[in-house]
């Protein structure tokens, strides 16, 4: 049964996106993984076809459609491979900071190019010394006339190499008590004096996703690049992290569905002891267990998407979905690899790549341990 937030126009959109990805992404994905980057040209093609930021206003180059279209984009990109995650991050995680908190001038300047794939965005919160403890960041932004002078270092930044516009979390008041009240968001543009990129990081998986370090040394960011109000950055992050975590949960669910599909196909075709391995009871039980977890995950996820689209407070449920669905997917990756036998460990089988790609979903967008602390806190513990 289709989810309640999906109408006929969503399915038509999905069909056209699938056709586009079959031509432009699936045949090239392996090469992108080898190159360790997705070419900018692909972003521009996504933009030309209306597959970037469809939910933003038409006057800024979007299609002004509901978030169900973004869900479809995230799902279909994940079907290609988890390395496409930077596109969903651009559409549903970074650009929303501009649409929600940006000034009219900022929106006019950046949004049309974001929708066209001419500006690629990133969000830079994490630092070498602060990840989960976000209020502990050390990057500072000191106001000096018309500019903020930014100093600090960010790491693990998705789209770190390609990004033209990076929203950074920094301390405009390093002595604020409580600490989070000193956090602000600034938009740093490519080519800004004092901004440079560090290493492109060599990861276990997500090989085609460019993840990098960013360095700010007396970096001069115009005052008008402040996003929203000074000192409210932490609040904005807490609000927008809900959608980020939901996007990670969606990707994990789709990854699990894809891995099960691959495995069912494999076990029906692989023979041992004179019969397909799908006929062993152990295989059947494993598949039945995974199918059950996937079905339950899908029902919970679709309900959550519906509630999120209706503007309900989904903080606790999003945290539940993020940890549970990413953990499900990691377990399923291991079971599916086992059912592939030795072939599952070979790179030419897709399950090997998915097995490498999935564990990070338990780490980024807030670790699964942090998700449990949020759930416990909201339960009054
Ligand atoms: C591929 C990749 C892409 C990423 N993309 C981005 C990005 O685009 N932008 C960005 O800003 N960041 C990004 N990150 C960073 C990511 O969000 C952080 O790695 C994550 O938040 C964890 O922070 P940390 O690595 O510093 O680990 P730490 O915070 O040092 O945590 C280490 C361990 O301690 C546990 N721990 C920490 N605090 C607690 C606690 N209170 N209770 C229980 N356990 C705790 C954690 O759960 C974890 O298991 C990315 C990371 C990766 C790997």
Image (cartoon, rainbow, N blue to C red):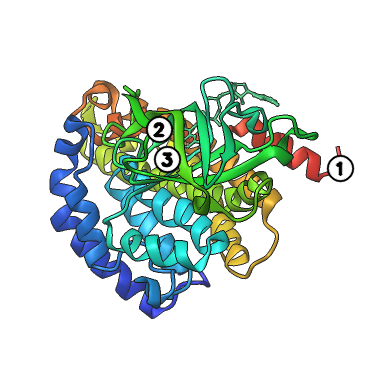
Q: Who's the residue at 29% across and 29% down the image?
A: 352
Mark 1, other Cα within 10 Å: few <14 / some 14–19 / many ≥20? few
Q: SS for tag 2?
A: helix
The x, y position of residue 187, in whole percent, is 47, 47
Dot in front, 1 or 2: 1
Mark 2, other Cα within 10 Å: few <14 / some 14–19 / many ≥20? many
Give the residue number, with chain letter if any, for mark 2: 333
Give the residue number, with chain letter if any, for mark 3: 287
Question: How many numbered circles does the render carry?
Answer: 3
Q: Who's the residue at 42% across and 62% down the image?
A: 70
The x, y position of residue 266, in whole percent, is 25, 38
Give the residue number, with chain letter if any, for mark 1: 380
Q: SS for tag 1?
A: loop
The x, y position of residue 232, in whole percent, is 68, 49
Disc 3/disc 1 C-alpha distance (Å): 37 Å
Residue that protrudes farthest toward the bottom in the picture: 8
Name which of mark 1 and mark 2 comes first in the sequence: 2
Q: Quadrant of ligand 1?
A: top right
Q: Quadrant of residue 367?
A: top right
Dot in front, 2 or 3: 2
């Amino acid at each position: 049964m289709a989810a309640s937030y999906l109408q006929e126009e969503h399915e038509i959109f999905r069909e056209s996106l699938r056709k586009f990805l079959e031509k432009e992404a699936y045949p090239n994905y392996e090469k992108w993984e080898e190159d360790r980057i997705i070419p900018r040209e692909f972003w521009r093609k996504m933009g030309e076809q209306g597959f970037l930021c469809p939910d933003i206003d038409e006057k800024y180059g979007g299609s002004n459609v509901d978030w169900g279209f973004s869900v479809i984009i995230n799902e279909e990109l994940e079907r290609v491979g988890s390395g496409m995650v930077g596109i969903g991050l651009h559409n549903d995680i970074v650009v929303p900071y501009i649409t929600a908190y940006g000034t009219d001038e900022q929106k006019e300047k950046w949004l049309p190019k974001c929708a066209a794939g001419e500006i690629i965005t990133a969000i830079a919160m994490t630092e070498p010394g602060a990840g989960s403890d976000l209020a502990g960041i050390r990057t500072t932004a000191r106001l000096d006339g018309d500019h903020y002078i930014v100093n600090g270092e960010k790491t693990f930044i998705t789209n770190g190499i390609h990004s033209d516009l990076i929203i950074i979390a920094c301390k405009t008041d390093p002595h604020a008590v409580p600490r989070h009240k000193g956090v602000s968001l600034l938009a740093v543009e490519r080519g800004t004096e004092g901004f440079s990129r560090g290493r492109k990081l060599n990861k276990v998986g997500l090989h085609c996703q460019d993840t990098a370090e960013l360095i700010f040394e007396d970096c001069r960011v115009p005052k008008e690049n402040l996003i929203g109000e000074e000192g409210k950055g932490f609040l904005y992050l807490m609000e927008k992290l809900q959608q980020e975590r939901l996007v990670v949960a969606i990707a994990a669910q789709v990854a699990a569905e894809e891995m099960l599909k691959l495995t069912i196909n494999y076990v029906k075709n692989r023979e041992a002891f004179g019969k397909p391995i799908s006929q062993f009871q152990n295989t059947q039980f494993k598949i039945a267990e995974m199918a059950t977890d996937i079905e339950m995950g899908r029902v919970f996820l679709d309900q959550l998407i519906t509630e999120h689209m209706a503007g309900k407070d989904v903080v606790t449920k999003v945290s539940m979905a993020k940890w549970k669905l990413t953990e499900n997917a990691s377990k399923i990756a291991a079971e599916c690899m086992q059912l592939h036998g030795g072939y599952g460990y070979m790179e030419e089988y897709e399950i090997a790549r998915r097995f490498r790609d999935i564990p990070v979903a338990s780490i980024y967008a807030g670790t699964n341990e942090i998700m449990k602390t949020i759930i416990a806190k909201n339960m009054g513990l």
